[in-house]
Structure formats: structure tokens, C-alpha cells
Amino acid sequence: MTFSSFTRKMRGRMRSNTCRIVLLTSLVWVIFDFVLITRYSDCIGKDGWRCKRSGEFDVELPNAEPLVDDNQLVDDNEINTEKSLDGDSGSAVIMGQGFASGGISMTYPSVSLKKWFLAPTVEETKGKPGEMGKPVKIPADMKDLMKEKFKENQFNLLASDMISLNRSLTDVRHEGCRRKHYASKLPTTSIVIVFHNEAWTTLLRTVWSVINRSPRALLKEIILVDDASERDFLGKQLEDYVAKLPVRTFVLRTEKRSGLIRARLLGAEHVSGEVITFLDAHCECTEGWLEPLLARIVQNRRTVVCPIIDVISDETFEYITASDSTWGGFNWKLNFRWYRVPSREMARRNNDRTAPLRTPTMAGGLFSIDKDYFYEIGSYDEGMDIWGGENLEMSFRIWQCGGILEIIPCSHVGHVFRDKSPYTFPGGVAKIVLHNAARVAEVWLDEWRDFYYAMSTGSKKQQSKKLKTKKNQQTKQSNNIFKTTKTILYCVHLTPNFKNYSLSIRNWL
Ligand SMILES: [Mn+2]
């Protein structure tokens, strides 16, 4: 071997080694970037992975993301945990100092409470599709029709049309819930259901499930709010139909497309019951769903309660029970998210799965709230358009205004979750959601709003002066409560020190 061929060989080897090193380090960087992106990004692409389901009047699908246990991050002294909240001495409970004087009474005058009896079980009609919450099987020769009808509402309309409006369901409650006794007198409720181009059978199955499974004495009325639907059958045909129902039911109509928030406010104005119960337009209430909600509010009128939201399959209309160990949180893009309930909250409930669960935020589609309290805290932010963010806004409003937000595990309501929205919004979904989220940040997050602006690309700063209305400011009465709330949200999001975290994010960005 000559000297020159030796050096050539050596150079060749070095070159291939250099290549290998370059390739390997690139690979390491690619993996590192991928891990970073998956760790910090909540949504990749428009409809892609981990994205929020786009906007119907809706609640999120309960696929809980695991959350690192936050017990180490919270000082229990910072969280308001009056023991009496879980007892019967509701009248003595005051959250924070801001509400010690003024505001609504914590209890109801006894004349406004009604004696009630259990609603009879809806019996199975043998041979009908979907009875006892079972999936509907579509015959092979009807598959094309099924696909065609699916497009109308983004769920299997053919299946829904085959199922009885009064279909039977299994009793999905936890064993312990069936044995529970609630106060013999409870406040009445009005049900407010907002819809836009809803299918006939899903809308009326919602209404019938309310009528069939609520103690009649507690059901004041059902208010349907039509947000400018274009379907003929939702006009006079619907009005004539509901006029004959055994419970007072009527239809209100917005003059033009107003969105969920303003439509709900219209419905709320006409409520004559003590409690407003908001439901989505494609739900099914199950046995014993209402009493545990009202029984909680009667103990403390500032408690806002949500049922467990079960899943009605958009493909088969099968009734599928959801987990009872998830609660509502949010990410810094201000998207609602489900998370596993941390052990701290399980311990507070003495590990009783039937006990009310305090949740930082709610999905928003289904909840009950005392009517006076709803207005006392300023109801919804009327400046929000169409849909999105209003559930977080209401959650922050409740916690920051001396209220308590809970999921009641003994109350189950099914909801048809869809993959995509059948509706179009003027101006596009993304723009509206960003607009609404910025309002939430400005009004309720104070200095934390910078976190939202840093994390949410495309968000535009809103004029906070305009948003900090007297109404909103008046409702944030107690700084004490404010601190408490932040402590809770803090744990949810693993931000042990806001300033440090914010700095690190900014540097990284
Ligand atoms: Mn919905």
C-alpha cells in the first residue's frame, strides 16, 4: 500500500465517520424537537392530533389526559375548604369575606321549595331499536341512506330516527347513588335548551328524557331557544308539538343568529323556576339525574353543579358511561380540557366516588345554577360571539365570585359527541374562539393573561379597559376569593411559580 492510497483510505473513513456523526446528531435533534413539540403543543394542524374538536354548541369528549399528581404543589391552607360545605348546614356557609354581607341569601325561603316524588322508571319497549341504550344496527341495504343523512347533523340521524323518543336506558348510577336520600323539598327548575338546525328526534328525545325522568313537581317548564334555524320543521310544527306536551314547554326565537351565549340569556330571561338548568339539544337525561343537582343547590345557592356527561355514540346512539374520575381544566390557549382528578380532591371527598367533586372548570353544555345567583355574578359575557370560551368564562366567574363549581357523580346525562361541527359561523370558527378567549383572559386572568397571549398564536390583545366593565368588576368582590382561586388553578397547571415559568417560556420562545 502506497502512502497516498493509505491517506485516501483514511480520509474516506473519516468522511464516513463524520457523515455518521452528523446524521446521528441530526437524529438526536429531530427526536429532541419532536419531544419538545409534543410536550408544549396542544394542537398540531387544523383538525389534527390533540386538537380541540371544532365548534358546535358543545362539550368536550371526556378523554382525560393524565395529570402529574399535584399534591406537592399545593399548600392546603391556601385552599378554602370549609367542612360544613359537605354537611347539611348550608345556611352557615360563606365563601370568603366579600359575600359575608349583601348578595343573595344562602338558602331558599321554604315556600319556594316543593315536595317531590321519584319519577317512574321508563320501561323497555321490547323489539324497538336502541332500547336500554343499546347500539342501533343499520341493515346493509340502508348504509347509503345512512351516510347521506349523517351529513345533515354530523351524527347518525337514521339511527336516531329509528329510536323511540321515549327510549329506555339502563340505570348507570353508582350503587351508592341509588341508596342516597335527598331533601324532601327542593327548588323547582326550568330547563333551557338552545338549538340551531337540530334534528327533530334528537331535540325531542332530549325534551322527553327531561319530562320522563324528572320529578314532575320540580320541573317548572322547558324553554327551547331557536337560534335562527333554517329548517321548516323547527318552526310552527315544533311549536304545535310542544304545546301538547305534559309539561309546559315553549319555543323562543332569536331574530338573527346570535350564538349560544346570547340565546341562553334570552332563555334565562323567561325562566320562572328557582334554578336554571342549561342542557344541550342532543342529550338524554338518565334516571335520578335531577334530584342530586337540586339537592346540592338547596344546601348552598352559590353552588353551580354539572352532571357527569356520558357519551351517546354519534355512530350507533349507544349510551356509554363516562369516567367519574375526571374534572375540568384548561390549557394556556384557554381550551377546555378534561384531566384526571388529583388525589388531593379524592382525599377531600374521603375517597367517596358518589360525593360532589369540585372542578376548576366545566364543559359548559350542561349545568344547573340558581337563577338569582346567575344574575348576581353578572350572567354571561354578552360580548362573546357564537360559541367557545364561555364555559371557561363562567367557571372563572363562579370561582372568583364566591361560588363553588361541582360535578355531581350521581347525576348522569348523555350527550351526542361529534367529530366536527355541522354549522358554519360568520367570520369563521377560529376567529370567534380567539376573540372570546381573549375576553376571558382580559376580564378574569389579570396579570396571568400574558401567559395566554404568549401561548396562543394568532391571539390579538383586546382593549382591557372596554372589557373591565363595571358589571365584571363588581362581581370580583373579594380578593380573598381571588387568591384561593388562583391557588387551585395553579395546581391544575403545574406552574409552581408563575414568574419563573413565564420567564422560561419567554426565553424559550
Ligand atoms: Mn352538543
Image: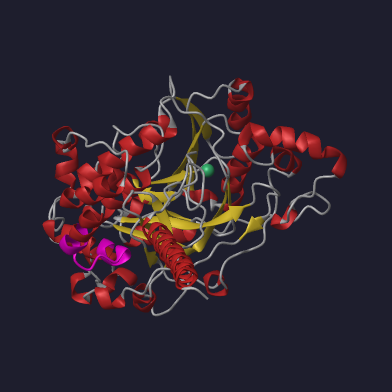
Tell me where residue 492 appears, x and y as whole percent.
32, 64
Q: Main secondary structure of the magenta part?
A: helix
Residue drawn at the location 16% of the way across and 32% of the way down: 466
Of residues 24 and 440, the one nearer the viewer is 24
In this picture, is 146 found above or below 411? above
Residue 95 in sight from this viewpoint? no
The residue segment tinted magenta is 489-502
Residue drawn at the location 23% of the way across and 51% of the way down: 451
Of residues 358 and 419, the one nearer the viewer is 419
In this image, 467 relative to 163: left or right?
A: left
Tell me where residue 336 appears, x and y as whole percent.
39, 52
- Residue 93 found in image quarter: bottom left
In this image, 500 relative to 18: left or right?
A: left
Residue 120 in sight from this viewpoint? yes
Of residues 206 and 455, the one nearer the viewer is 455
Colour setup of the view:
secondary structure
